[in-house]
Amino acid sequence: MINIPEVKLGIVAVSRDCFPIELSKSRREAVMKACSKKGILIKEIKTAVEN
């Protein structure tokens, strides 16, 4: 038995008071496109975290 956790990478959009949530979402989408072009496996979480 191998006791090594399987780790997966994920990304969420985070918006602060002075940072519009739509800009956060569009930046998340841009990062996802760049990662997919480089072959990086990453899960896009559609939830946006607001402060």
Image (tube, grey):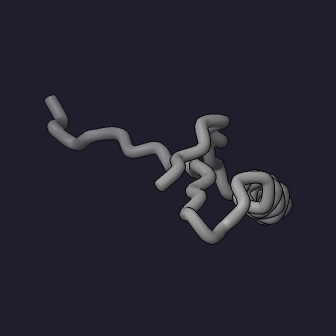
Rendered-image quadrant of the N terminus: top left
- Observer-nearest of 51 and 31: 51
User: At 57% from the left edge and 56% from the top edge, which residue is drawn?
Assistant: 14
Q: Position of residue 44 (x, y in %)?
A: 66, 42
Give the residue at the far bottom of this rendering: 18
Residue 31 horizontal side relative to residue 44, left or right: right
Q: Position of residue 2 (x, y in %)?
A: 18, 36
Residue 13 horizontal side relative to residue 31, left or right: left
User: At 66% from the left edge and 36% from the top edge, which residue is drawn?
Assistant: 46
Query: Image quadrant of residue 5?
Result: top left
Q: Position of residue 49 (x, y in %)?
A: 52, 47
- Compared with 37, 41 (above or below) is above
For the image, the number of numbered tags is 0
Q: Position of residue 36 (x, y in %)?
A: 79, 54
User: At 58% from the left edge and 49% from the top edge, which residue is drawn?
Assistant: 12
Give the residue at the far top of this rendering: 1
- Compared with 31, 47 (above or below) is above
User: At 66% from the left edge and 67% from the top edge, which residue is drawn?
Assistant: 19
- Observer-nearest of 12 and 34: 12
